[in-house]
Amino acid sequence: MHDVLYYALKGGVRIMRSVYILMHQRKPDTGVLARRVLEALGEAHIAASAESWLWERLDGGTRRLLSDFPPERCEAVISIGGDGTLLRANALAVRSGLPVLGINVGRVGFLTEVEIDRLEEACGRLADDAYTLEERMMLRATVGERESLALNDVVLSRGGYARLIGVNVWVDGDQVGPFIADGLIVSTPTGSTGYSLSAGGPLVCPEVECMVLTPICAHSLQHRPVITSAAQTITIELDGDHDAMMAVDGREPIRFSKGQTLTITRSEHAARFIRLGPKSFFNTIRIKLSEWSR
């Protein structure tokens, strides 16, 4: 086991020599996959650390390939899984400004950069500094003193109750709602390919700076998705006596009650993704949605 970080200079510029690994915890072949990842990083002379649960699942030989340092001391985070794993990796990386490389072993992987069969190539590209960084806008959701960051979306839902909820919505003080629906999604352009899309929201190019409000199973046909500027402020309150549940990027939901106010703005933080080459948004949509429908 190593306890140092490796750095190198190439043409007077420091190139990547340390990463933190996040993996999907419920994959049946986690140990085999982890060894492959660590061996590929070792060949590229990149030190790697990982979450404690992964250490516990590895055999002694594989464990010796890991270094022991916290994520804030690394230069990037590698996500091995699908979009859910990548969202978790971004939540870990974003406040430190660390970039994330998504390697897909999930089913769809809208947000990931490469498939697992390109793992060795991806590690070599990191070592050679042959990549670019792409930034994606994020949301800041505030309820009282609680603040959360979202790359995909903030979702208000009726939870486990078989009833509609009333939601009052204002954009820069102008009333947009009320919405009577199963819930309401506020998404980024990145999140427009997720839950919002399933609820009838529009696909939005990631370069567009906006927020998308999409009602979930609205009671009235007049309740349609609304697109706002990223510079505007969205304010949400419940209309009625029933509580709702609020989830940020699919993480553990919290109760949202009448009398509370949810404020959503653009975050000062941006997600940073490692890109290994040009990527067409519409080509990705076409391929991924075709795979999803199989």
Image (spheres, grey):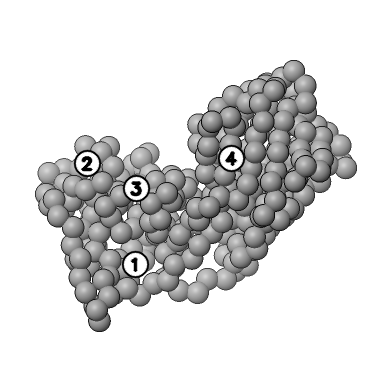
Q: Which mark is residue 122?
A: 1
Q: Find residue 174 and report its horizontal and vertical position in percent.
A: 81, 43
Contact check, label 4 and label 3, Cβ < 8 Å: no
Please rate how many residues cluster around mark 4, counting C-alpha atoms within 10 Å: few if below 14, some from 14 to 19, many from 20.
Answer: many
Quadrant location of residue 142?
top right
Q: Residue at x 76, y 32 (%)?
A: 167
Q: Which comes sooner in the sequence, label 1 or label 4? A: 1
Mark 2 / mark 4, whichever is N-terminal? 2
Residue holding disc 4:
141
Q: Are marks 2 and 4 in contact (CB under 8 Å)?
A: no
Disc 1 secondary structure class:
helix
Q: Amino acid at mark 3?
A: Leu
Which residue in the protein does label 3 denote? 22
| Residue ID for mark 2 | 55
N-terminal of the pair, mark 4 or mark 3, is 3
Measure how far apart labels 4 and 3 are at the Cα level: 25 Å
Q: CA distance from mark 3 to mark 1?
A: 16 Å
Per the image, label 3 sits on a secondary structure element best described as: strand
Residue 291 visible, this orientation = no
Q: Are marks 3 and 2 in contact (CB under 8 Å)?
A: no
Q: Earlier in the sequence, mark 3 or mark 1?
A: 3
